[in-house]
Amino acid sequence: MRIIQATLEHLDLIAPLFVRYREFYGELPYPDSSKAFLEKRLRRKESVIYLALSDEDDTKLLGFCQLYPSFSSLSLKRVWILNDIFVAEEARRQLVADHLIKTAKKMAKETQAVRMRVSTSSNNEAAQKTYESIGFREDKQFKNYILPIG
């Protein structure tokens, strides 16, 4: 498996798996809107997307992760939010997520980030175990809240 950073040239490769990711979390597919969303992120350099590609076939996407930059006012440093990570069903149990996260962690270190943050649904035990095995810890200092808009 090879991990690469996505560019606009990879848009057609990423979009179908991104749609499957959204469906996994109960969202409607909206393939055109999903592709347009990814295109904006890449074009505006608003996110970093890593792709896990098969060694045998460069057009076979095993998984992806997307990170958004943020900052910590308390530590006066950059924070990376690992907002999206998904592994194709047929590629699960091949450590794809581990390789993607390790690459993201390397990038976070190179950009002098103080930490990476990740969230997952409270019932996604497989993801929770993966995150914990890599070194993520549950945040006991801060409780997170959301405010839906609209």
Image: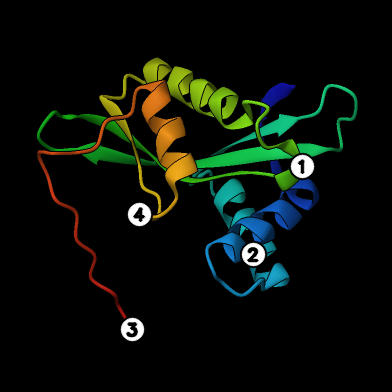
Dot 4: element: loop
Q: Nearer the viewer, mark 2 or mark 4?
A: 4
Which quarter of the rendering shows the N terminus?
Answer: top right
Q: Which residue is under mark 3?
A: 150
On the image, the x and y values in percent for residue 94 come to: 68, 27
Report which quarter residue 71 is drawn in: top left
Q: CA distance from mark 1 to mark 3?
A: 37 Å
Disc with the residue nearer the chain's start (4 vs 3): 4
Q: Which residue is under mark 2?
A: 34
Identify which residue is drawn at 40% across, 55% down: 123
Which quarter of the rendering shows the C terminus?
Answer: bottom left
Q: Which residue is under mark 4?
A: 122
Up/down of 87 relative to 53, above or below: below
Q: CA distance from mark 4 to mark 1?
A: 24 Å
Identify which residue is drawn at 42% across, 34% down: 129
Dot 1: element: helix
Labelled disc at residue 90? 1
The answer to which of 141 and 59 lies nearer the viewer is 141
Q: Amino acid at mark 4?
A: Ser
